[in-house]
């Protein structure tokens, strides 16, 4: 049997690892996640032919945030390439989720292709499979992010993308209707899919608020809708770090009054202590400090968010433009390239550095 564990030692380590992972997913306590990674890593090292521990190790590593994503992709890819009939679809789904966490155009494209292929395979087998709904709602997230959120953050207008937003809203309504009528919605674990759905809704309204930046009333209405959606996701999946981060961003960037910014700082400071979102939280705390013209504080936060390429670029920008320190900027970028060579070699990072050095 392809999922049979090789020895009692493998079973013991695997069981302890999965129990720790379940505890983490219930509590979001970082110590549980660290324990899960440690047990499952030991299991894979001692019993490398066992696919099940490697599959769960990939999931656990993906939950660590930026510093676990490459290892997660490697382990999940190994399971897929091993040709496991039992694990292949789930491994493809989790690999797509791992690509999503990179938040680059290339990785979002990879995730979209993986999910589309999965849904074709699932459609041939069953139209009421929990994994099918999970893949559908994740695919919706990917497409909203690619085609609405990212352009909105780059300054796109409502006139250009408003119709696309309406299309995604309609697709989310269609998903809600289909899932609520399905057998899958009655099964244990359905809250996970509903939480993903509400997160999608929040991301959509976040994007719509940004697109409507010149219509204050509409922008505020969508910001409030985003808050409601993210809170609903957290009701279903308490303490979910990515959604808590999304909530903080609505407070700091879309509402932006001092009370809201203070709420955002409280959430982000908590996430920065020890969570899968610690790098992103430090990056966003840096952005708040930069907006307040606290340059040294901003650079400190950006350095703590070093795994995120745009944090290194933000710190470099502050050094050059706000502190007039091009030498400091060059030293920071050199150190980043040595520490995170894979990030620093990406074409979008190289182009951003070139533009920064040219003064653009």
Image (spheres, rainbow, N blue to C red):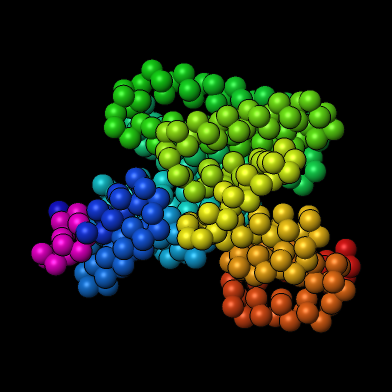
Where 79 sits versus 96, above or below?
below
Rendered-image quadrant of the C terminus: bottom right
Where 180 sits versus 278, above or below?
above
Residue 201: quadrant of the picture: top right
Q: Position of residue 315 (x, y in %)?
A: 73, 68
Residue 83: quadrant of the picture: bottom left
Give the residue at x 20% y 57%. Answer: 15
Give the residue at x 15% y 56%. Answer: 4
Q: Position of residue 324 (x, y in %)?
A: 88, 74
- Magenta-colored stretch includes residue 281: no
Where 4 sits versus 356, above or below?
above
Left or right: 260 with respect to 294? left
Q: Which residues are magenta?
A: 2-15
Residue 241 shows up from this direction: yes
Between 232 and 212, the one lying in front of the other is: 232
Give the residue at x 17% y 65%. Answer: 10
Left or right: 224 with respect to 113? right
Q: Position of residue 314 (x, y in %)?
A: 74, 63
Where 323 sits versus 35, above or below?
below
Between 162 and 279, the one lying in front of the other is: 279
Give the residue at x 54% y 44%. Answer: 244
Between 278 and 208, the one lying in front of the other is: 278
Q: Position of residue 336 (x, y in %)?
A: 65, 76
Left or right: 253 with respect to 306? right
């Amino acid at each position: 049997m392809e999922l049979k564990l090789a020895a009692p030692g493998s079973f013991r380590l695997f069981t302890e690892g999965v129990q720790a992972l379940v505890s983490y997913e219930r509590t979001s306590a970082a110590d549980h996640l660290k324990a899960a990674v440690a047990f499952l890593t030991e299991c894979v090292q001692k019993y490398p032919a066992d696919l099940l521990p490697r599959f769960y190790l990939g999931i656990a590593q993906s939950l660590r945030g930026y510093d676990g994503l490459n290892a997660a992709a490697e382990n999940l890819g190994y399971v897929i390439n091993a040709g496991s009939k039992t694990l292949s679809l789930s491994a493809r789904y989790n690999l797509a989720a791992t690509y999503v966490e990179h938040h680059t155009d290339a990785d979002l494209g990879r995730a979209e292709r993986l999910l589309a292929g999965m849904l074709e395979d699932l459609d041939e087998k069953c139209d009421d499979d929990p994994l099918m709904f999970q893949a559908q709602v994740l695919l919706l997230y990917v497409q909203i992010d690619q085609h609405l959120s990212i352009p909105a953050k780059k300054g796109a207008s409502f006139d250009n993308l408003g119709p696309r937003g309406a299309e995604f809203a309609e697709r989310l309504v269609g998903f809600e209707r289909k899932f609520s009528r399905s057998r899958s919605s009655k099964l244990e674990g359905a809250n996970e899919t509903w939480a993903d759905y509400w997160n999608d809704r929040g991301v959509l309204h976040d994007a719509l608020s940004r697109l409507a930046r010149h219509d204050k009333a509409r922008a505020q209405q969508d910001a409030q809708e985003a808050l409601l959606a993210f809170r609903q996701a957290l009701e279903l999946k308490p303490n979910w770090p990515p959604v808590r981060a999304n909530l903080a961003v609505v407070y700091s960037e879309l509402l932006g009054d001092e009370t809201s910014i203070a709420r955002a700082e409280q959430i982000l400071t908590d996430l920065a202590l020890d969570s899968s979102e610690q790098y992103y939280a430090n990056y966003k705390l840096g952005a708040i400090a930069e907006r307040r013209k606290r340059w040294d504080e901003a650079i400190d936060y950006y350095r703590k968010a070093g795994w995120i390429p745009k944090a290194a670029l933000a710190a470099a920008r502050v050094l050059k433009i706000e502190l007039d320190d091009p030498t400091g900027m060059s030293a920071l970028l050199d150190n980043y390239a040595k520490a995170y060579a894979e990030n620093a070699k990406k074409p979008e990072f190289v182009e951003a550095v070139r533009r920064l050095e040219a003064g653009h």
